[in-house]
Amino acid sequence: MNYRKATPEDLNYLSELFDAYRKFYGKVTDLEGAKTFLKNRISNAESEIYVSENSAAKLVGFVQLYPLFSSTRMKKYWLLNDLFVHPEFRGKGISIGLIDKAKALVKASNACGMYLETEKSNIIGNHLYPKTGFELNTECNFYEWEAK
């Protein structure tokens, strides 16, 4: 498996994976919207996206991180916002490889760490993340406000 940073040339296949990821979380398919969203993230350098491709150079997974900053630590902090592997390729360690790319980004950018959020019902993710060194923070409350 090859892991690398996504490029604009990846947009067609990456958009298909991203759309499948969104459907996994109950969103309505929107392939063109996915392509536009990812194109903007890449062209505006608003996120870091890494992809995994198999020996046939087919994209089979991705991870997307957004930069944040920790005021108390006075350092960059990364949000691992999206992680997805096509169902046909799960169970082969691809998610771990993508998380390893995210960890390398944290170190290379001299950030203090990264965090993620996943639904309690995401059984696969909730088993995966502790295996890759993430610790569940039970000391904090997570609040959300949505503009309507």
Image: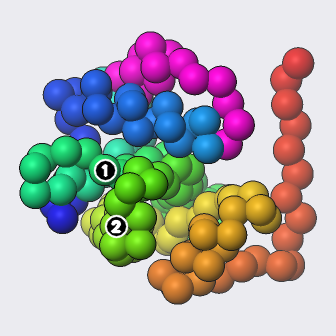
Horizontal side of residue 14 vs 80, given as left or right: left
Identify the residue at image location x=62%, y=79%: 127
Residue 126 visible at all: yes
Q: Is residue 33 magenta?
A: yes
In the image, residue 36 lies at what x, y percent?
A: 42, 16
Determine whether 137 is above or below 105 in the image.
below
Determine whether 3 is above or below 132 in the image.
above
Identify the residue at image location x=50%, y=37%: 20
The kind of residue on which mark 1 rests is: Val
Horizontal side of residue 104 vs 2, given as left or right: right
Q: Which residues are magenta?
A: 25-40
In the image, residue 5 lies at what x, y percent?
A: 23, 48
Give yes or no for contact between labels 1 and 2 (Cβ–Cβ under 8 Å): yes
Q: Which mark is residue 48?
A: none
| Mark 1 or 2, nearer chain start | 1
Q: Which mark is residue 94?
A: 2
The kind of secondary structure element at disc 1 is strand
Which SS does the magenta portion mostly show? Answer: helix
